[in-house]
Image (tube, rainbow, N blue to C red):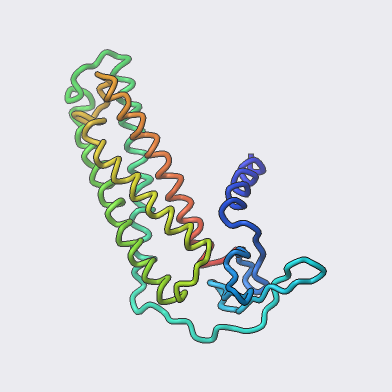
């Protein structure tokens, strides 16, 4: 199973990064597309200047300098705000799945009044899920702004593929979260899924598809961000 997952990840990594190489110092995987017009780049992790040299027709990364000074943000806001969406959204996912399971059980058992089931806890669970969804989505905006500021200051706006991927995934998560906030009150009426009409079925499918996609997107963001900070 792990080999299958690795093949799946490597397929998309090749599509996004293109041909890659490993930094000789910190072993960070970088893309040849990150090279400038002089075939050089500064490693975003360790700060060495790497030049791509042709040896028998094959590109080889060679270290020829070190970036001594790298501006550091005065306030480490990005790592702090990152923990809000990453920490809260899994509970949003679990809460929504719990409401889905209970709603299916109510449908099978013929329970038509959600307020009479679980002592009226379903509306409370639904409201908590919505609050956490709103906080995780709203905090992702602060995370994006602080990360974008770090990219401008610390990395001098260098167009690394890994940072471009983080920017794209951040916008994608914000889109998923916004749509789910708009659909939440339609999907969970009185805290439960009603399955009363075709539009509600359609909204429910979109909601949980976006929920799953947002979870995968956020997990990838956390993995890529940690890889960029700590290396391999």
Question: Residue at horizontal 20%, vertical 29%?
Answer: 189
Work out whether 29 lies above or below 103: below
Q: Residue 196 location in percent, x, y?
A: 24, 18
Which quadrant of the figure has residue 35?
A: bottom right
Compared across the picture, whether 146 is left or right of 112 comes to right
Which residue sits furthest bottom? 68
Q: Residue 186 location in percent, x, y?
A: 22, 31
Question: Residue at horizontal 63%, vertical 84%?
Answer: 65
Q: Residue 90 location in percent, x, y?
A: 38, 45
Q: Residue 120 location in percent, x, y?
A: 18, 29
Question: Residue at horizontal 64%, vertical 67%?
Answer: 27
Compared across the picture, whether 126 is left or right of 100 comes to left
Question: Residue at horizontal 30%, vertical 31%?
Answer: 99
Split into 4 quadrants, where in the image is the N terminus? top right
Split into 4 quadrants, where in the image is the C terminus? bottom right
Compared across the picture, whether 115 is left or right of 144 comes to left
Work out whether 218 lies above or below 162: above
Work out whether 171 lies above or below 155: above
């Amino acid at each position: 199973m792990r080999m299958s997952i690795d093949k799946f990840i490597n397929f998309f990594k090749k599509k996004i990064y293109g041909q890659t190489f490993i930094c000789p110092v910190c072993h960070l995987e970088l893309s040849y597309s990150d090279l400038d017009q002089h075939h050089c780049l500064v490693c975003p992790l360790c700060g060495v200047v790497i030049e791509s040299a042709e040896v028998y027709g094959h590109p080889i990364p060679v270290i020829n300098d070190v970036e001594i000074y790298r501006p550091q943000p005065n306030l480490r806001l990005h790592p702090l705000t990152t923990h809000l969406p990453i920490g809260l959204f899994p509970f949003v996912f679990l809460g929504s799945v719990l409401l889905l399971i209970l709603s299916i059980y109510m449908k099978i058992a013929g329970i038509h009044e959600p307020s009479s089931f679980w002592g009226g806890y379903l509306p409370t669970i639904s409201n908590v899920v919505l609050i956490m969804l709103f906080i995780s989505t709203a905090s992702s905006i602060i995370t994006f702004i602080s990360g974008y500021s770090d990219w401008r200051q610390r990395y001098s706006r260098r167009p690394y593929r890994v940072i471009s991927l983080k920017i794209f995934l951040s916008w994608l998560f914000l889109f998923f979260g916004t749509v789910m906030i708009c659909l939440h009150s339609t999907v969970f009426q009185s805290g439960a899924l009603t399955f009363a009409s075709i539009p509600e079925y359609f909204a429910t499918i979109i909601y949980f598809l976006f929920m799953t996609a947002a979870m995968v997107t956020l997990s990838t963001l956390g993995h890529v961000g940690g890889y960029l900070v700590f290396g391999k």
